[in-house]
Image: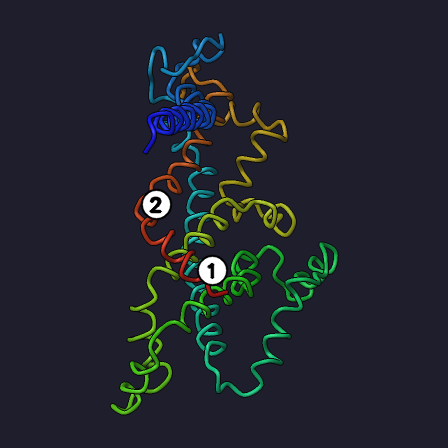
């Protein structure tokens, strides 16, 4: 290798590293600012002199958040819809993908055409609203779960992954007397953990961050998820009422509405951030093995 080539390569790597560090800093700065804000006391947060580290650190903001019944209830709704929505989505979409992955499935081409039409031709917001109303899902927890139980895109990714599994495994299981459901539960799922974990990450994050469905279909505030409540706090000028609730619950005046917003934002982000590192090793493998053959 020529000396000049080595110099160019090192220079390029250095520039790439600097660029990535700069992008990382730009990405992390808002999060660190919000984190520092959430741990700062009312006087500091009101003066807006917060940097990367909180001055006069305090947990009063988080105490106010978790002592508020509205936020605690919304957090429970978000956890419930994320867990149940993800589990049911994997069940329904996984079974559909397992059936579609079989070449001897009767009417396979027609079913695929039927499944793929909604991917390209959507009804729109008004038909969806009318459908949800006709199904009596307004002000029901199931409005978070039923519309998202199936995805054609996810079904294609899982089916593509399943086609790569050896047919001899299923043939051996059938010789031993296993049925399709037994094969799916005891053979297919254990061998398909990466793709199921990947889809679970997609669906789980989408369920956790979703707020618009509650905004449209839910007038009962007791069933609002955390993101919808956060939206109302930040954009619908409910800070005054929120401050009053916080002060009433804590009996202290050192908590500002802005700091409560930041603390609520951190509470809504931390669960997804904590889960992602444990699923990352499956994420790359699941996406690549499912996408290459799609």
- Residue 241, given in percent of the width and then of the height, sits at 56, 26
- Name the foreground residue: 4 vs 94: 4
Q: Nearer the viewer, mark 2 or mark 1?
A: 1
Snapshot quadrant of residue 185: bottom left
Circle 2 SS class: helix
Q: Which residue is mark 2?
A: 275
- Name the foreground residue: 59 vs 150: 150
- Name the foreground residue: 44 vs 99: 99
Mark 2 and mark 1 residues within 8 Å of each other at the beta carbon: no
- Compared across the picture, whether 127 is left or right of 284 comes to right
- Neighbours of disc 1 within 10 Å: few (<14), some (14-19), many (20+): some
- From this view, report whether residue 122 is shown above or below residue 73: below
Looking at the rendered structure, the number of numbered marks drawn on it comes to 2
Location of the N terminus by quadrant is top left
- Residue 239, given in percent of the width and then of the height, sits at 56, 25
Circle 1 SS class: helix
Q: Which mark is residue 291?
A: 1
């Amino acid at each position: 290798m020529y000396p000049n080539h080595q110099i160019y390569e090192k220079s390029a790597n250095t520039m790439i590293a600097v660029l990535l560090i700069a992008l990382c800093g730009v990405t992390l700065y808002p999060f660190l600012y919000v984190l520092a804000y959430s741990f700062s006391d009312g006087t500091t947060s009101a003066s807006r002199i917060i940097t990367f580290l909180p001055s006069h650190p305090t947990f009063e903001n988080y105490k106010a958040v978790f002592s508020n019944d509205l936020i605690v209830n919304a957090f429970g709704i978000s956890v419930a819809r994320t867990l149940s929505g993800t589990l049911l989505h994997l069940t329904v979409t996984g079974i559909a993908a397992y059936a579609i992955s079989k070449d001897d499935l009767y009417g396979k081409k027609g079913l695929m055409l039927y499944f793929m039409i909604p991917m390209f031709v959507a009804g729109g917001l008004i038909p969806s609203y009318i459908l949800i109303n006709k199904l009596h899902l307004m002000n029901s927890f199931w409005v978070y779960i039923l519309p998202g139980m199936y995805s054609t895109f996810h079904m294609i990714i899982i089916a593509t992954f399943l086609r790569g599994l050896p047919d001899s495994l299923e043939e051996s299981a059938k010789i031993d007397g296993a049925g399709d459901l037994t094969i799916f539960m005891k053979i297919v799922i254990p061998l398909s953990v990466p793709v199921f974990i990947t889809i679970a990450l997609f669906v789980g994050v989408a369920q956790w961050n979703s707020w618009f469905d509650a905004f449209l279909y839910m007038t009962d505030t007791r069933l609002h998820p955390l993101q919808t409540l956060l939206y109302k706090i930040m954009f619908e000028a409910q800070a005054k009422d929120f401050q009053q609730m916080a002060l009433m619950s804590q009996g202290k005046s050192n908590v500002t509405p802005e700091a409560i917003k930041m603390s609520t934002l951190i509470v809504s982000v931390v669960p997804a951030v904590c889960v992602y590192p444990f699923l990352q090793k499956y994420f790359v493998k699941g996406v690549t093995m499912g996408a290459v053959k799609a």
